[in-house]
Image (cartoon, coloured by chain):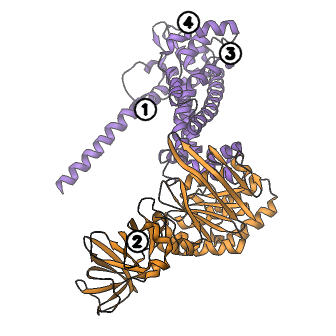
């Protein structure tokens, strides 16, 4: 069942259209992420769902109830802000109890639930402390606990991990995922960090300039991006995008990479009908760094030769920058001791891994 | 080394000058209050024969007749003291409460807009003397002359501006996310204000309250014009200690001590909040 349905949501701020015609739905118990660069409209979308902004067009339906015009209190959603909104003048206990207290829940029940959530979030020792004096990671857990304790239909998270440092972030990511599974919470997560979204989400919606470009599971978004923007935004190191031209040579298609002599043959024309209408056109070829094979030996079937401009060590892996004309091509390989900067290498690209986009519309064609 | 000593010396010198500037008049008031009648107008600092006479005089002013040519009978200080406490206390509380809600609205809803909020300051740009006469006429028609209510209304109307502006500064510092989080967790707007915002800006309330209290406590012109017998306040009362050939310094100094006492006590009680208020905004 769909817990949240967002239909044709549009929000303008003066002349600026922050969210354009956004639609998606979230299933019960799903971890759904809105992913995009800052200013793409993801936070505005979230705030519309929370009721902190009024959409100009569209509908928001939470659990079969149209909440588009309802005030925040009546929507059954909780929101964890980027700067954790803990109430600094209250103790941790009072913070956690806040939502229940304003609902006039019996004292005994409040106590039971607070202790329960404090146990889950590892806050038991701090219950009596004044929240304003605690560290970031504790504040974050308090904010999370306060949002969860009122049992919202949907938990909204607005970049909650941006401010915590890397080690804590890692732990919190796991923690959040565990909590979500354990308590079966439906989560809408807003982030600009693609890795975070990939690691935690069941599904991701990639946003840019107020629009949703693609919705899918992390694997789908990674392996099957529908737009150049999605391909570029997902994956680290960033995908190689090569401007090229589709040419036909003796019944075979080949990509002629711009400003070079490099041709990549991508199969018989008769077998690849999709490409027929693009023949002679400008295309963008996307190749993930990890799909590129580098060899020092001359092997049959290589596509071009190049020199290693420089190497970035990443521990168990390394990122190799290959010179191609004036540009670099990034290749990711497991740690190899035989490669050194300045080496001459032969590069091979597996044909089935090439993503082809139309240059003008940036739409995926193959 | 030498340089260090000089800089240290200069620092202490500046502090001593500054403290003297503030404290010598206070010391003067205190010593004067303990001087006997013959010593009032003599130019030395410490009384030769310290006495409590001046303090007795302000409660039993009958004996004043004759001193410095004083002919009129002055009332005991009790009633003006109680009047001042009542009028100033009530108008301070009113100013702070109204100020808080106005400031809250202005801060959170930008309404009636920052410019309109600025208009509340305009009332403070006229010298009070310009509108004290019309107010006296109004009050006379409304039967508010020489009444506590009249003074309370006027005092709170005049000082509410300070309440608004001081508190707006504090409320602006409370991140709106804290309130939004509370809203989303099911709190009503009123609950948000009373359980989240108000407790956080508590020190602001206290500080603006102290400021307004001090302003009203020392107010003379309105009280002088608008009161007569029933609602006379302390500053007006002090001005009455005057004889044919000059001020009655001794009782005036004793009254000065009495009227300084209340602000000092209040300041002592709320000093914890003063520190919080000055560092406000860093609590995040």
Q: Quadrant of the N terminus of chain B?
A: bottom left
Circle 1 sits on which residue? B27
Nearest to viewer (mark 1 / mark 4):
1
Query: Judging from the image, what is the letter of the chain drawn in purple?
Result: B
Label 3 sits on a secondary structure element that is loop
Where is residue A286 drawn, in percent x and y? 42, 72
- Apparent colour of chain A: orange
**Residue B237 found in image quarter:** top right
CA gap, disc 2 and disc 1 = 88 Å
**Residue A100 found in image quarter:** bottom right
Nearest to viewer (mark 1 / mark 3):
3
Chain under label 2? A
Who comes first in sequence, dot 1 or dot 3? 1
Circle 4 sits on which residue? B71
Chain under label 1? B
Circle 2 sits on which residue? A285
Q: Is residue A347 left or right of residue A67?
A: left
Where B233 falls versus A192 (above or below)? above
Label 1 sits on a secondary structure element that is helix
At horizontal 52% and vertical 35% (from top left) the residue drawn is B166
């Amino acid at each position: 069942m769909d817990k949240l349905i967002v239909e044709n949501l549009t929000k303008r701020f003066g002349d600026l259209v922050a969210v354009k015609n956004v639609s998606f739905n979230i299933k019960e118990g799903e971890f759904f992420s809105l992913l995009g660069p800052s200013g793409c409209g993801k936070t505005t979308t979230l705030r519309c769902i929370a009721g902190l902004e009024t959409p100009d067009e569209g509908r928001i339906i939470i659990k079969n109830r149209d909440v588009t015009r309802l005030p925040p209190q009546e929507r059954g959603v909780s929101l964890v802000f980027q700067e954790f909104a803990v109430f600094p003048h209250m103790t941790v206990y009072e913070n956690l109890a806040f939502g229940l207290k304003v609902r006039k829940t019996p004292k005994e029940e409040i106590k039971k639930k607070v202790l329960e959530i404090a146990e889950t979030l590892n806050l038991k020792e701090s219950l009596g402390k004044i929240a304003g004096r605690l560290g970031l990671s504790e504040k974050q857990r308090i904010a999370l606990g306060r949002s969860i304790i009122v049992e919202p239909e949907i938990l909204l998270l607005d970049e909650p991990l941006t401010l915590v440092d890397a080690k804590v972030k890692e732990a919190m990511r796991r923690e959040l995922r565990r909590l979500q599974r354990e308590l079966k919470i439906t989560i809408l997560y807003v982030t600009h960090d693609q890795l975070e979204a990939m690691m935690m989400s069941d599904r991701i919606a990639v946003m840019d300039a107020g629009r949703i470009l693609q919705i899918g599971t992390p694997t789908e978004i990674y392996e099957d991006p529908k737009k150049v923007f999605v391909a570029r935004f997902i994956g680290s190191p960033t995908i190689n995008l090569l401007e090229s031209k589709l040419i036909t040579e003796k019944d075979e298609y080949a990509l002629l990479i711009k400003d070079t002599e490099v041709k990549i043959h991508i199969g018989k024309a008769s077998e690849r009908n999709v490409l027929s209408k693009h023949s002679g056109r400008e295309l963008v070829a996307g190749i993930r760094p990890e799909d590129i094979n580098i060899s020092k030996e001359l092997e049959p079937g290589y596509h071009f030769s190049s020199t290693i401009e420089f190497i970035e060590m990443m521990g168990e892996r390394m990122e190799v920058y290959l010179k191609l004309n004036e540009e670099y091509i990034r290749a990711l390989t497991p740690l190899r001791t035989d490669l050194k900067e300045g080496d001459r290498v032969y590069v091979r690209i597996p044909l089935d891994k090439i993503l082809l986009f139309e240059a003008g519309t940036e739409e995926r064609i193959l | 080394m030498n340089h260090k000593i000089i800089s240290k010396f200069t620092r202490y010198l500046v502090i001593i000058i500054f403290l003297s500037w503030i404290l010598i008049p206070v010391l003067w008031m205190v010593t004067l209050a303990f001087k006997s009648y013959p010593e009032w107008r003599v130019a030395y600092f410490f009384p030769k024969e310290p006495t409590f006479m001046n303090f007795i005089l302000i409660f039993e002013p009958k004996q004043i007749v004759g001193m410095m040519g004083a002919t009129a009978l002055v009332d005991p200080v009790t009633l003006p003291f109680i009047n001042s406490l009542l009028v100033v206390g009530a108008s301070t509380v009113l100013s702070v409460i109204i100020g808080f809600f106005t400031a809250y609205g202005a801060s959170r809803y930008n309404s009636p807009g920052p410019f309109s909020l600025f208009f509340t300051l305009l009332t403070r740009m006229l010298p009070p003397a310009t509108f004290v006469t019309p107010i006296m006429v109004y009050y006379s028609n409304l039967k508010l002359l020489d009444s506590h209510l009249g003074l309370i209304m006027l005092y709170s109307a005049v000082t509410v501006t300070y309440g608004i502006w001081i508190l707006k500064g504090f409320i602006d510092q409370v991140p709106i996310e804290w309130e939004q989080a509370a809203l989303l967790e099911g709190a009503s707007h009123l609950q948000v204000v009373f359980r989240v915002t108000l407790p956080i800006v508590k020190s602001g309330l206290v500080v603006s309250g102290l400021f307004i209290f001090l302003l009203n406590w020392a107010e003379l012109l309105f009280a002088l014009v608008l009161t007569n017998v029933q609602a006379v306040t302390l500053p007006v009362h002090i001005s009455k200690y005057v004889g044919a050939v000059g001020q009655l310094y001794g009782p005036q100094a004793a009254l000065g001590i009495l009227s300084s006492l209340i602000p000092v006590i209040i300041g002592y009680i709320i000093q914890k909040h003063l520190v919080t208020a000055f560092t406000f905004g860093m609590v995040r």
